[in-house]
Image (cartoon, helix red, strand yellow):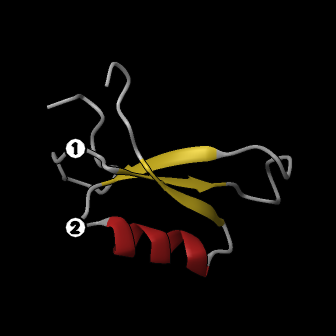
Amino acid sequence: MTGDRCSAKGCRADGTWQLRWNNPSLHAPDRRKVWLACDEHKVSLSEFLSMRGFLREVEPHEPLGN
C-alpha cells in the first residue's frame, strides 16, 4: 500500500485516480483540491462532485516515489 488512500468513506484501497475540483464560490478559478479515488469509487466520487459543479479534471494518480 502506498498510503495514498481513496477518499471514499471507509475505503482502504489505494487511490489510482485524482479527481481535481474546486468550489467556485470559495476558491479562485485556477485552484484545485484533490480527492483520490480507487477504480471502484471513481465514478461515484466523480458524480458527487459533478452534480455540484465542482469537478474540473480526472487524471491518473502516480504516487510519489514511483
The residue at the point 30 percent across, 34 percent down is 4
The residue at the point 19 percent across, 52 percent down is 10
Provide the residue designation for mark 2.
40
Crowding near the residue tagged with mark 2, few <14, some 14–19, many ≥20 C-alpha atoms within 10 Å: some
Residue 7, image x, y percentages: 35, 50
Provide the residue designation for mark 1.
14
User: Split into 4 quadrants, where in the image is the C terminus?
Assistant: top left
Question: Which quarter of the figure has residue 12?
Answer: top left
SS of the residue under disc 2? loop
Q: Residue furthest top?
A: 65
In the image, taking residue 38 as reference, residue 54 lies left or right, namely right
Residue 53, image x, y percentages: 68, 74
The residue at the point 17 percent across, 48 percent down is 13
In the image, residue 2 sits, relative to residue 29, either above or below, namely above
The residue at the point 27 percent across, 40 percent down is 5
Question: Which quarter of the figure has residue 38?
Answer: bottom left
Disc ID at residue 62: none
